[in-house]
Amino acid sequence: MKKIIGTLLLILIFGPLSACSKTPNKISPLSVGYMDGSTVKLSENISFLLDNPNKVCIIFPYDFAVKVYYEQKGVSREIKNTMDYSPKGDIILDAKGGAFSSQVLTVKLDLTNDKLSGPTNFVARISGHICRTHESFNQEIPFTVIP
């Protein structure tokens, strides 16, 4: 009987504490909104509104570790992002409903050495990690550039 009561007490005391520290197994992608649409002209910046729908926060470096790519004639090419981000500290997207669960990311493409013959599909890849677990978080955001 004492063992049963002791076990119940441990469950009552430590059960709720362990539930607070668990991270959901399934992390959903960020919700992405396009500030001025998903198609931009060659010389324009593109801005994304990123919203965290998860129950955990996500940490990104100051520039979201963004890498931009496009594919033309079967060849993938990385494009330099010339946006200057400030401040240089980490960006924490709060869990869903938090005061800072949304953030705007603007990308400035350096296409001076690239010739686009028509509308071209691009992908911005962002990378960060989940709070507490440090599990990697990566997401691709598609957009189109027109000459």
Image (spheres, grey):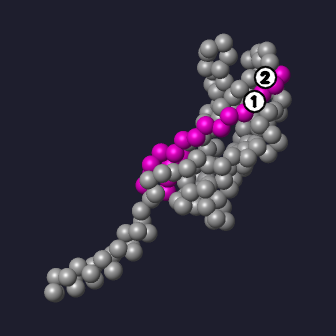
Which labelled disc corresponds to residue 75? none
Which residue is rendered at x = 44% and y = 59% of the image?
23
Which labelled disc corresponds to residue 144? 1
Locate the C terminus by quadrant: top right
Q: Which residue lies furthest to the top in this view?
A: 73
Residue under pointer 2: 119
Residue 87, position in %: x, y?
67, 51
Which residue is rendered at x = 23% and y = 79% of the image?
7
Q: Hey, what amino acid is under mark 1?
A: Thr
State the separation of the CA atoms marked 2 and 1.
6 Å
- Local crowd at mark 2 within 10 Å, few (<14), some, or many (≥20)? some
- Local crowd at mark 1 within 10 Å, few (<14), some, or many (≥20)? some
Q: Is residue 15 above or below residue 86?
A: below
Residue 110, position in %: x, y?
74, 27
Can I make out residue 87 in this image?
Answer: no
Residue 68, position in %: x, y?
65, 31
The magenta region covers: 128-147
